[in-house]
Amino acid sequence: MMRNFLYFLLLSHVLTSCSSNSAQKALKEDKVLTIQKDDKRESLYSIKDSGYFWNELDEGKFLILEFKDKTIDSIDTYFGVYSLKNKDIVYLKVSKDKTDDFDFKKDTVYGSTDKYIILKKGSKKSLKDLTLYFDDYFSSPIFKNDKIYFWGIDYNEKTNLGKIYATEYNLLTSKTKQKFLIEDDLATDFRGYFKEPYENNDKIIFEHQNKKWVFNKEFQ
C-alpha cells in the first residue's frame, strides 16, 4: 500500500480507548509510517515526537510530522500516513484546543482529529476542498492504491437528512467517482456512524445498517 520509501518507523502499540468511538480505534494496529528521501538523498519527511490527544468524544495517539526538519502537523496514528507514487502524502491532522486548560502530563493534549490533508512538498491541501461531498467527521475514508474510498455526504441542515454516496477519489488524477446509495438521518455526533469501507477479494465494500454495496476495480 505504501510505496517510494526507504525504511519504516514502526509505531509502538495499538490505540486504547474509553469512549465508544475510541473503542473502534482499538480494533486496528498502528500504521507504519514512511520516511522518504528525495533524489539528492536529503530527508523529506520525518517523525519528531509522539503523544496522546483526548476530548469528551475521542482520544488517540499523535505524531509530529516534519518536512525538511520543519514541523508540518500533528498527525493521527490510527489513519496513518500514506505515500503516493508522486511522493505526495496523505494524513489526518490532529489539532490542539486553543482553550486548552486540561493537559495533565507533558505528552498529552486536549484536542481532536481535524482535517484530512494532502501534502505536496510542504504545501498542504484539504481533501474536502479537492473532491465532492467529503466530510472530515463522517466520511470514514480508507486508502488503497493511490485512491481514497469514502462515504460522500450531501447534507441538508434544514431536515438533518443527507444524500449518501459511495465515493472513489483518485489522488493522482484528481478524478471522483460517486454512486448514490441512500438518504439518511444524520442527527448524531458519533464519528464512526458510517463504518469504514473495506476491501475483500479485490472488491470495495460499503456497509451501513444491514445494507451492503459492493464495487469492482472500475467502481461499478
Image (cartoon, rainbow, N blue to C red):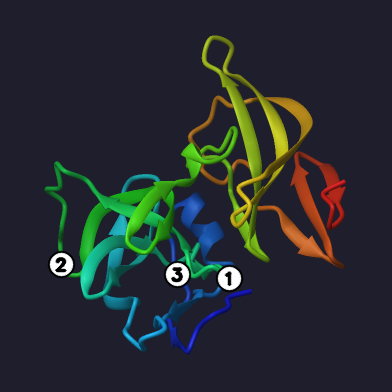
Q: Residue 197's x, y, as percent?
A: 70, 53
Looking at the rendered structure, the kind of residue marked 2 is Lys
Of callouts 3 and 2, the N-terminal one = 3
Q: Residue 120's x, y, as percent?
A: 41, 60
Q: Residue 194's x, y, as percent?
A: 64, 43
Asked if labels 1 and 2 touch by Cβ distance under 8 angstroms, the answer is no
Residue at (50% x, 83% y) in the render: 5
Query: On the picture, is 149 further left or further right than 103?
Result: right
Residue matched to label 1: 85
Residue matched to label 3: 15
Looking at the rendered structure, the kind of residue marked 3 is Leu
Indicate the secondary structure of the residue bearing disc 1: loop
- Residue 52 or residue 113, whichever sits in front: 113
Asked if labels 3 and 1 touch by Cβ distance under 8 angstroms, the answer is no
Measure how far apart labels 1 and 3 are at the Cα level.
Answer: 28 Å
Of callouts 1 and 3, the N-terminal one = 3
Residue matched to label 2: 105
Asked if labels 2 and 3 touch by Cβ distance under 8 angstroms, the answer is no
Measure how far apart labels 3 and 2 are at the Cα level.
Answer: 18 Å
73 over 151 or under it: above or below: below
Residue at (41% x, 48% y) in the render: 125
Looking at the rendered structure, the kind of residue marked 1 is Lys
